[in-house]
Image (cartoon, grey):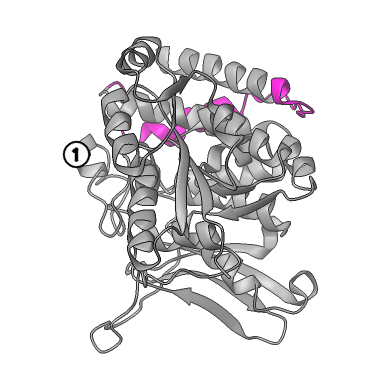
Amino acid sequence: MTRRPVRVAIAGSTGSIGTQTLEVIRAENERRPGSYVVTGISVGRSGGAALAQAAEFDIPLIVVDDDAARSAVAATGRVRVDADPTALIVDADVVINGIVGFAGLSVTTETLRSGKRLGLANKESLIAAGPVVQPLRSTPGAEIVPVDSEHCALHQCLRSSFDAGREVTRLLLTASGGPFRGRSGADLAQVTVENALQHPTWNMGPKITVDSSTLMNKGLEVIEAHELYGTPYDQIDVVVHPQSVIHSMVEYTDGSTIAQLSMPTMKLPIGYALGYPDRLATPFGAIDWATLGSLDFEAPDRATFRCLDLAYAAGRRGGTAPAWLSAANEVAVDAFLVGNLRWNQIAEVCEAVLERHDGGTPHTVEDVIEADQDARRITKEVLQR
């Protein structure tokens, strides 16, 4: 019997996750024609690039955030155009949320509220709005399949357990260590934006690449792991693994550790989210075991890369503290990228903002938005000082 094509919507289609999602769909449709159709995409300002994607994949809907870019796309008369990112969700079976930063929150909440599968690459929306997102996961049909390589790895490892909640001892998130692994704080006082964007194993957007260099990305992933799997923070550890072949591990009560291994490519976790619970036919990330070489591990340097422990602290504090940290980090990274902040001041700014956290707890999306705005305002005050 012929299976109906999986209908996919992509939020942030011209970014790193979005473009790779389309590459995965292209490869799968070449192997198994008609497996996937793209029902809609969203972009910020990249209207021309979105039109090119729509032409290749016969996409009927483009959501454009920027007013001028939206008008330009609409003027072509080639596709339906909308301003509301949640318009993507209506005709989709799977929504890939590849929007960077807090802006992806509405796609996360509305996808789950609609009872759809969410391929989540936008970690900030879950981190900032965990107390609001969690109840939505109980909507019939709603499910989160993580697209982060580390959380996708944990998802796969936990599938192997008969009773993961009872049998799991630790979740171990691996970190490449970024471009500055092994360097001291004094060495990093004058690093440039160009230095921070030279990731040794992954090709990512600038914000996430900077987060990787500070280990904030890993800290936020610790909070995300807690939200996704309900694991206490004391049972979530980080280990540096520079080869980025083991993407995460789960340790069980009998001492067994199950790891997920593949060569570093985001196409594997994207494909996992698209095909779940089945696996794709295209072997993204397959390992040549004869040439792999060694797999090395070390403890993270928490004194130099202080953002990791700031994330643990925000996660344990709970409430809106993770939202404040995420917002403060976004503003600080933006300041670093334009040359208004030194790399080693990113942690200082985030710490100063967390010290002013008001102890709030979000109950609605509006509460989360307000917390995000408060944190951004305070971060800008800190930067001005």
Q: In this view, does 66 lie above or below 326?
A: above
Residue 106: which quarter of the image? top right
Look at mark 1 in the image and give the residue it sits on.
194
For the C terminus, give its image quadrant. Answer: top left
Number of marks in picture = 1
- The magenta span reads 340-367
Q: Nearer the viewer, residue 38 or 288?
A: 38
Left or right: 361 as drawn, with respect to 86 = right
Report crowding for label 1: few under 14, some 14 to 19, many 20 or more residues within 10 A (C-alpha): few
Residue 257: which quarter of the image? bottom right
Q: What residue type is labelled 1?
A: Glu
Residue 76 in the image, given as x and y percentages of width and height: 30, 17
Q: Does the magenta stretch include residue 285?
A: no
Disc 1 on helix, strand or loop? helix
Q: In this view, does 380 lie above or below 242?
A: above
Can residue 306 be seen in this snapshot?
no
Give the residue drawn at x 43%, y 32%.
Answer: 60
Residue 341 in the image, given as x and y percentages of width and height: 32, 25
Residue 243: which quarter of the image? bottom left
Q: Which of 43 and 220 is in front in this view?
A: 43
Left or right: 162 as drawn, with respect to 271 = right
Residue 182 in the image, given as x and y percentages of width and height: 30, 59
Residue 327 in the image, given as x and y percentages of width and height: 53, 28
Q: Is residue 177 above or below residue 297?
A: above
Can residue 178 be seen in this snapshot?
yes
Q: Which of 247 and 331 is in front in this view?
A: 247
Give the residue drawn at x 23%, y 85%.
Answer: 291
For the N terminus, give its image quadrant. Answer: bottom right
Q: Residue furthest bottom?
A: 290
Give the residue drawn at x 79%, y 45%.
Answer: 139
